[in-house]
Amino acid sequence: PDLVKDRAQDLRDAASSLLQTKTLMDIERQGARNTIRAELKNAFARVIGQGSFSEVVIPEMAVQ
């Protein structure tokens, strides 16, 4: 089974919940991309289980 596809809605919800807590200052802080990546990895691991994936890739970050 494709765990990511099966849990896509839950993963989007986890990402959205995490990112809603971020301020512009949080996002602009040096190293923020790595911090957010690590936080997303932890959030996703809670949804689909530790060891189910190896990395979270953020190809582009847009601040709106």
Image: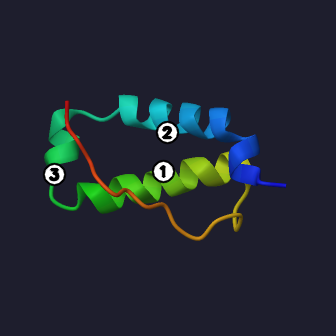
**Residue under label 2:** 15
Q: Amino acid at mark 3?
A: Arg
**Residue under label 1:** 40
- Mark 2 or 3, closer to the camera: 2
Q: Which of 3 and 40 lies nearest the eye of the viewer?
A: 3
- Mark 3 or 1, closer to the camera: 1
Q: Amino acid at mark 2?
A: Ala
> Label 3: how many residues lie within 10 Å, few (<14), some (14-19) or many (20+)?
few
Query: Image check: 54 left or right of 40?
Result: right
Q: Is residue 52 above or below residue 40?
A: below
Residue at 56% x, 47% y is 43
In primary-sequence order, the first of circles 1 and 2 is 2
Query: Image check: 17 left or right of 63?
Result: right
Residue at 76% x, 52% y is 3
Residue at 72% x, 41% y is 7
Query: Image check: 35 left or right of 32?
Result: right
Q: Secondary structure at mark 3?
A: loop
In primary-sequence order, the first of circles 3 and 1 is 3
Q: Secondary structure at mark 1?
A: helix
Are the residues at dot 3 and dot 1 in contact (C-beta closer than 8 Å)? no
Figure quadrant of residue 6: top right
**Residue under label 3:** 29
Q: Position of residue 50 (x, y in %)?
A: 70, 62
Q: CA distance from mark 3 to mark 1?
A: 17 Å
Quadrant containing the C terminus is top left
Q: CA distance from mark 2 to mark 3?
A: 19 Å
Q: Secondary structure at mark 2?
A: helix
Are the residues at dot 1 and dot 2 in contact (C-beta closer than 8 Å)? yes
Quadrant containing the N terminus is bottom right
